Image: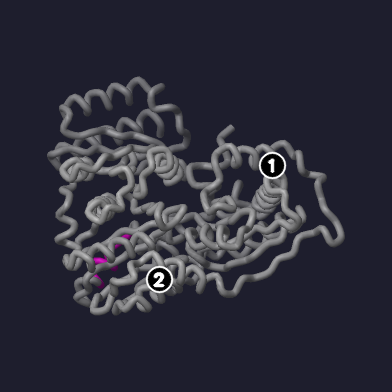
Amino acid sequence: MARMFGTDGVRGIANVAPMTAEMVLEIGRATAYVCKEHQKTQRHRIVIGKDTRVSGYMLESALTAGICSMGVDVYLLGPLPTPGIAFITQSMRADAGLVLSASHNPYQDNGIKIFSRTGYKLPDNEEDEIEQLITSGAIKDVRPTAKEIGKAQRIDDAIGRYIVFCKNTFPDQVTLEGLKIVLDCANGATYKVAPIIFTELGAEVTAIHNKPDGVNINDDCGSQHTADLRRKVKETGADIGLAFDGDGDRLIAVDERGEELTGDHIMAICAKWYKDMGMLQNNRVIATVMSNFGFHEAMKHHDIEVGVASVGDRYVLEMMKEQGAVIGGEASGHLIFANHHTTGDGIIAALQLLAVMRSSDSSLSELAGIMRMFPQKLINLEVKSKPPIEDIPELVAAIDKAEKELAGAGRVLIRYSGTQSMCRVMVEGADAAMTERLANGLADTVRTCIG
């Protein structure tokens, strides 16, 4: 049986298993039970936040009912970026923080991410404990009564607390005055907080896709769709464009010429600046297997060591802790600055990037020159099953043949998504035409072998 929790919590189509109100209620009950078992305090509290999906209302109510039914109090934050919920959880010393969001997925999906009281995502073993309690029915008859039932209340100043937290990560001696910024809020969780933060730091802000209606989250906007942002940056003569995803934990930037920068670019720029400022702990950054060859070249040129983690911010963070790194992230824009937060935060990442621009008096296009992107072709294929790649001889042979043709000047990576029924085929090489041809050939093999 497939594990309920993927690389970033539970996720699926809202009102379809596992994201039904009934299952979410059970997840709430099991999470509350685990919190009570692990934290021996008098009264237990769990924080709940969400993004702007229409299904958030239904699932928030179910989650609240499940938690309260186990004798744990609930604090409702409303729409707030995922990293904001992690911060509030830690700040309030709550037992856990639960986020209702499917991140960059379309509006019909939803999901649950769980943070511990320390602001870090729950480790795999605690997620497995929650799943086991649900599947076994072990807590079916554990039902407090009378005054032991939990209560729910709203926290009205959560946004204000998070705004102050984010602004405090920006250097005191630096200002954004005179800077023109375009923000793409993806009609998601950053729609209120992001414009306030950058405006209060002195920037002239133009916000787009900041009017959520429950169904337009990530719809041709945000970190995965930057066409509107690129257009707006050029139209307004802005110095930079910043695109967040639906729950605000990713950042993709656009320079003043309308050129898109990946998470690799942002990581490289910030790593060099951190090193120059004496802040790059252990002279190391953590990337993933999806990071571009150009990133590794740039870090080698600046004598910065790179650790390579599996895809998923939890695995990046694990390696950051193991190797004592302060910067880590993914090409997709999920960036972690461990000196500021316990999880990836698009707004905080943007503030670090802006700090480099202002401190170095450089344009973003100048800073982006730190690395040269190797041509990369990524093809996402929907699949009905996820058999181990190494168990498919025809696909193994095709990968081997492609790698021989690349002759060490590129790479092949084929992996399943941890949150979607999808196989990702990526080829990177020095020649764009060859890279595309090899990727298309491997994609055809995946379609034939997996379907």
Mark 1 and mark 2 lie on one chain; the one further toward the N terminus is: 1
For the residue marked with disc 1, what is the amino acid?
Ile
Residue 109, label in figure? none
Q: Give the number of the disc on residue 194.
A: 2
Is 208 displayed left or right of 303 in the figure? right
Label 2: which secondary element: helix
Which residue is painted at 25% across and 51% down in the image?
275
- Percent from the top left, x then y, of residue 334? 38, 52
Q: Examine the rendering and report whether any part of residue 326 can be seen.
A: yes
The correct choice, above or below, for 165 with respect to 39 in the image is below
Q: Which residues are magenta?
A: 225-232
Which residue is disc 1 drawn over? 134
Residue at (20, 63) in percent of width and height: 364
**Most common SS among magenta residues:** helix
Q: Residues within 10 Å of mark 1 (few under 14, many from 20)?
A: some
Residue 368 on the magenta span: no
Q: Is residue 34 above or below residue 51?
A: above
Say whether residue 230 is magenta.
yes
